[in-house]
């Protein structure tokens, strides 16, 4: 798992993930994601290049989302592939982890008051 973090405007960070979000991938994103969730008002998680999502990966995404929500922020997933989308849907976390299919849709989902 490779992780790239880009600080954006309005206290929103874009996190680009590439690889498998399995046990080892989840270990790599745990601390950076928790840090961002504690300090940003929004996190856009670009999952375009995530090829696999295990339950431990879902756990870290949900924890980050809940941390942001408690502070009035939001975590939005950008363009996960159909397999990853199916895993998220089947696990029942879609309401906690909204999915955007474009940068414009993601920006609207991260806008204050949405």
Image (cartoon, rainbow, N blue to C red):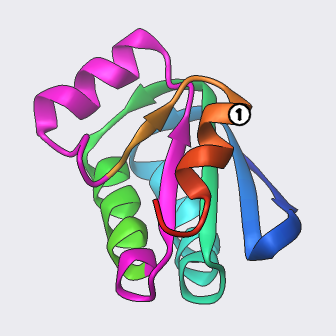
Q: In the image, residue 93 lies at what x, y percent? A: 20, 45
- Vertical relation: 27 (above or below) 72: above
* Res 1 seen here: no
- Assess whether residue 78 is covered by the magenta stretch: yes
Quadrant of the image occupied by residue 18: top right
Task: Name the residue at 64% across, 88% down.
Answer: 39
Q: Quadrant of the N terminus?
A: top right
Task: Name the residue at 55% across, 88% down.
Answer: 38
In the image: residue 26, left or right of residue 9: left
Q: Residues within 10 Å of mark 1 (few under 14, many from 20)?
A: few
Quadrant of the image occupied by residue 87: top left
* Res 35 seen here: yes
Q: Which residue is mark 1?
A: 104
Give the extent of the magenta segment. Answer: 68-96
User: Closest to the observer: 15 or 26?
Assistant: 15
- Assess whether residue 85 is covered by the magenta stretch: yes
Quadrant of the image occupied by residue 47: top right
* View extreme (top): residue: 82
Q: Secondary structure at mark 1?
A: helix
- Vertical relation: 97 (above or below) 103: below
User: Closest to the observer: 72 or 45?
Assistant: 72
Task: Name the residue at 87% across, 67% down.
Answer: 9
Q: In the image, residue 98 lies at what x, y percent? A: 38, 43
Task: Name the residue at 13% across, 37% down.
Answer: 91
- Vertical relation: 38 (above or below) 85: below
* View extreme (front): residue: 113
Q: In the image, residue 65 lies at what x, y percent? A: 39, 66
Q: In the image, residue 114 lies at what x, y percent? A: 46, 59
In the image: residue 22, left or right of residue 113: left
């Amino acid at each position: 798992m490779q992780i790239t973090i880009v600080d954006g405007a309005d206290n929103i960070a874009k996190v680009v993930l590439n690889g498998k979000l399995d046990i080892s991938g989840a270990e790599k994103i745990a601390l950076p994601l928790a840090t961002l969730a504690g300090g940003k008002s929004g996190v856009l998680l670009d999952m375009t290049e995530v090829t696999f999502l295990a339950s431990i990966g879902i756990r870290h995404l949900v924890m980050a989302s809940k941390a942001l929500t408690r502070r009035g922020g939001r975590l939005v997933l950008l363009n996960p592939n159909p397999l990853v989308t199916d895993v998220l849907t089947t696990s029942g976390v879609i309401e906690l982890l909204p999915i955007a299919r474009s940068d414009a849709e993601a920006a609207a989902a991260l806008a204050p008051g949405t």
